[in-house]
Amino acid sequence: MLGLRDRLMRGSGPVDAPAGPTLANCTACGLCNDVCPTYLETADEREGPRGRIGLMQMLAADGRRSGEGLETIERHLATCIACGACERACPEDVPFEAALHDARAELFARGCLPAGRSKLYAFFAERIATPDKFGRIVRLLQAMPKVSRRMLGSSLGALADGIASAGIAGGGAQFGGAGTALTSGVARGRVMLAGGCLERMQRPAMIDAAIRLLARRGFDVEVPADAGCCGAIASELGVTRAADDLEARNVDGWQRAVSRTSDTTDMPRPAVSRILTLSNKCRDQIRATPEDGTADTRLHHLLAEATDVIDYLAAVDIGAPERWSTLRVGYLGSCRSETAERGDPVPQLLRDAGYTVVHLGEPSVCCGGRGAFPFMQPEMAASLRRRKLGQLARTDIDVVAVRDVGCVTALGGDPLLPVLHAIELLDWAFGGPVPEGLSRYQNFAHDVPSADPLPTEEQAATVHKG
């Protein structure tokens, strides 16, 4: 695994790969600061990518730094959302986020975090991997909001503030956990869905929607019992031990699922052809799984080709919608949903499903709900939330569609402007139930005549082989 000093010398590729862009490629042009949420909020150079690159270079160049210097470095790296906007704006392809994760991991390993924060990070990284147990902790903290900080100390008290900011419900999940949803008739393919962790706590309905939509359009969906959180949150916080443990557990669980026979019914079922995730961050984490011999060749190929469920739906023919809506949908893409090579497919998917899509201002500026950020930096997250809500209030839309579950909880709460994950709107258009929060709009959707049938058995086999 590369470290921070490797990012200075080699870039973000494998150790034996040709040299790629590094932190040293930064020309300090400042284009990154123009799209950085925390810099736009504070106008502090150290709260922008350019300043943080300088701090990481200081950390890498002098590993013996101590005292106030390390505290300053840690404080300003901790407030980065890791949204990726700076990397998209950078003309030199500086690997900022990879270096940020390495720097956080080094600071954590060297015990450079303020008293209590390292314990908080470790606690959160380990508990978030078991959403059911974490949900019980959430309910406990919510039951005593006024005394949680005094009783639990500053670290868990800060977590209680973050939970309130992130909008965790702590119960009422619809997602039933591990299992397999078999499509009726001939299956076009079989996929494994990574069940997620934040999704199970913040918006379990989106998991239900993804499973329903995939199964309805001809795909068997398996959620392995022995796999769960991908470790992206732990990696983001710099708690590499927890991230490695989760990665190993998932590889073991996925290996068992891939190795099992697929003939579970009277009708032969296809083998697993793809691992799907509910967020781009989980996809990137799974793709980065090292080839260390624990996964066989077939599973390693599946890990390297892990795909966000939205991207997968855009790549396969899901046919015509069963309902047509007149709703105006304001779309906020995930901070990492657009790249220079390929645009975000959600707007076109929503249009194909009959919705009118309205693009919103500052699409690359994060709302503050991403990953662990609202838990660990509730004040900055609240400030970014207010900024985004102000933009939404000035837009003529009926509903907001997002691609990251954190955006749902960060921006939701107004019954007059529902905020849903895009997969929920797609599921509704393709025959699913009315999404939570949209019951007042159910008369705005109308059934349409049956369109072209899904592929025949021969066509489905061709799709599967491809």
Image (spheres, rainbow, N blue to C red):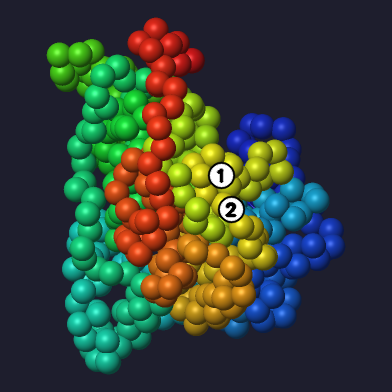
Quote the CA–CA distance across marks 2 and 1. Answer: 6 Å
Secondary structure found at label 1: helix
Kind of residue sitting beneath label 2: Val
Contact flag, marks 2 and 1 (Cβ < 8 Å): yes
Q: Position of residue 17 (x, y in %)?
A: 67, 32
Q: Is residue 261 visible?
A: yes
Give the percent coordinates (x, y) of residue 55: 68, 69
x and y percentages locating residue 252 in the rendered image: 28, 34
Q: Looking at the image, which residue is at 30% across and 39% down?
A: 212
For the point 41% across and 50% down, the residue is: 445
Q: Residue 261 or 96: which is nearer the viewer?
A: 261
Q: Is residue 121 above or below residue 156?
A: above
At mark 2, the secondary structure is strand
Residue found 19% across the figure and 68% down from its top: 136
Whichever of callouts 2 and 1 sits on the residue coming sooner in the sequence is: 1
Could you tell me how many numbered marks the image carries? Answer: 2
Instruction: Please indicate, yes or no, whether residue 306 appears anywhere in the rendered image.
Output: no
Q: Position of residue 9 (x, y in %)?
A: 72, 47
Mark 1 nearby-residue class (10 Å; few <14, some 14–19, many ≥20): some
Mark number, residue 384: none
In the image, taking residue 88 as reference, residue 357 lies left or right, namely left
Q: Which residue is mark 1?
A: 351
The residue carrying pointer 2 sits among few (fewer than 14), some (14 to 19) or many (20 or more) residues within 10 Å by Cα, namely: many
Depth order, front residue of 3/64: 3
Residue labelled with disc 2: 357
